[in-house]
Amino acid sequence: MHFCSKNKRPEEKSMLDAQLDLSPVLKIIEEKRHEKGSLIAILQQAQEIYGYLPLSVLKCIARELGIKPAKVYGIATFYTQFRLQPTGKYQIMLCQGTACHVNGSERIESTICQELKIKRGETTPDGLFSLESAACLGCCSLAPVMMINGQAYGPLSAEKAVAIIRKIKAAESLSLVGGEAQ
């Protein structure tokens, strides 16, 4: 019996996210099962599908590949490319490189955290914003700089960063109102 199959034993069912469709990850595993060193590639593709790596997906991968769940979890937590929590619609990446640091990135981060009421590594309760930091975004001429979904913003002040976030929030509010009116 497959751990990820629809016919789960009661103890297995409690360990999985009840509403998560695992068939896409099962397909990936079948395609890559016999490739040596395929775990990272499987995790990458699973994250592309789900947007992050739910615990039930990690357990499914471990069971289907016949490896310990701790090993899969260890790989997923070791590499920064993997996320174990859903991210916001807008992913804010704040640079902490030398040029950004000396130009006030810590104050900007503190102000963003206050504005969004989250800490670095968290997502707002409405799922709109996630905040992360990077050692360097490679935009030193714009220092201090942040990226939101790959778009660079800089040079920043704390006030400019908040204004950008508020503009995104306002646009989201308008699109929600417009979507409901239609």
Image (spheres, rainbow, N blue to C red):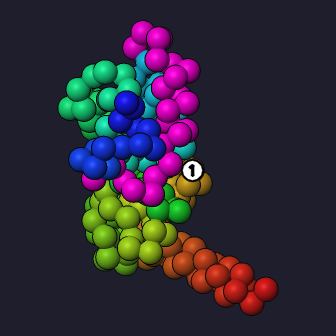
- The one nearer the camera, 58 or 76, is 58
- The one nearer the camera, 57 or 172, is 57
Would you say 110 lies left or right of 140 here?
left
Residue 73 percent across, percent down from the top left: 26, 35
Task: Please give the residue where the numbered disc 1 appears in the rendered image.
Answer: 150
Q: Can residue 178 be seen in this view?
A: yes
Residue shown at 56% from the left, 54% from the top: 149
Residue shown at 39% from the left, 56% from the top: 18
Residue 137 percent across, percent down from the top left: 46, 43
Query: Which image quadrant is residue 158 in?
Result: bottom left
Query: Which image quadrant is residue 43 in?
Result: top left
Residue shown at 32% from the left, 49% from the top: 13
Location of residue 178 with respect to 99 vertically, above or below: below
Give the amino acid type for the residue marked by disc 1 in the picture: Gly
Would you say 54 lies left or right of 51 here?
left
Magenta stretch bounds: 14-37
Would you say 171 lies left or right of 165 here?
right
